Amino acid sequence: MTKIIGIDGFNRKQLAQEIQNGAKFVYYMYTVSIIVMTFRRSSSIHFIRSGQSATMRGLPSTLISFFLGWWGIPWGPVYTIQALVKNLSGGVDVTQEVAAVIAGNAGL
């Protein structure tokens, strides 16, 4: 299973309650290029509580892409722009998928 950052200290019921209150699970994209090779990857899943900024949480991935993503030809600029747009809009929301796993495992 993928590591989820930010859920330490929460049990399944508490996570379900947080999700009902507006929390979400997201991951971020990042791109690293080396001249003719471009690598597009995703971060671990992050738990974003209600009221927290998902954009700020994704800042490390955004900065990696901004400084290291452009340099690969031809895909570096394309993947970098995609990563920046996704990350600056709050990441890729996977709350429904993670909530389904939590509910299935908890018998909710």
Image (cartoon, grey):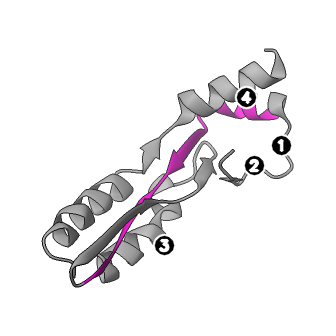
- The quadrant holding residue 61 is bottom left
For disc 3, the marked residue is 60
Q: Extreme left residue here?
A: 74
Per the rendered image, the range of residues in magenta is 14-34
Q: Residue furthest front?
A: 36
Circle 3/circle 4 CB separation < 8 Å: no
Amino acid at circle 4:
Ile
Q: Residue at x 48, y 72 (%)?
A: 60
Q: Quadrant of residue 79?
A: bottom left
Ranked by sequence position, the earlier of labels 3 and 4 is 3
Q: How many residues crowd around disc 2 within 10 Å: few (fewer than 14), some, or many (20 or more)?
A: some
Which residue is tagged 2? 7
Q: Residue at x 53, y 62 (%)?
A: 57
Mark 1 vs mark 4, foreground winner is 4
Examine the structure image and report whether residue 26 is included in the region drawn in magenta.
yes
Q: CA distance from mark 1 to mark 4?
A: 12 Å
Q: CA distance from mark 3 to mark 4?
A: 27 Å
Residue 1, horizontal then vertical, whole percent: 69, 44
State whether residue 26 appears in this view. yes
Secondary structure beneath label 2: loop
**Which residue position holds label 1?**
10
Identity, as a three-letter code, of the amino acid under mark 3? Pro
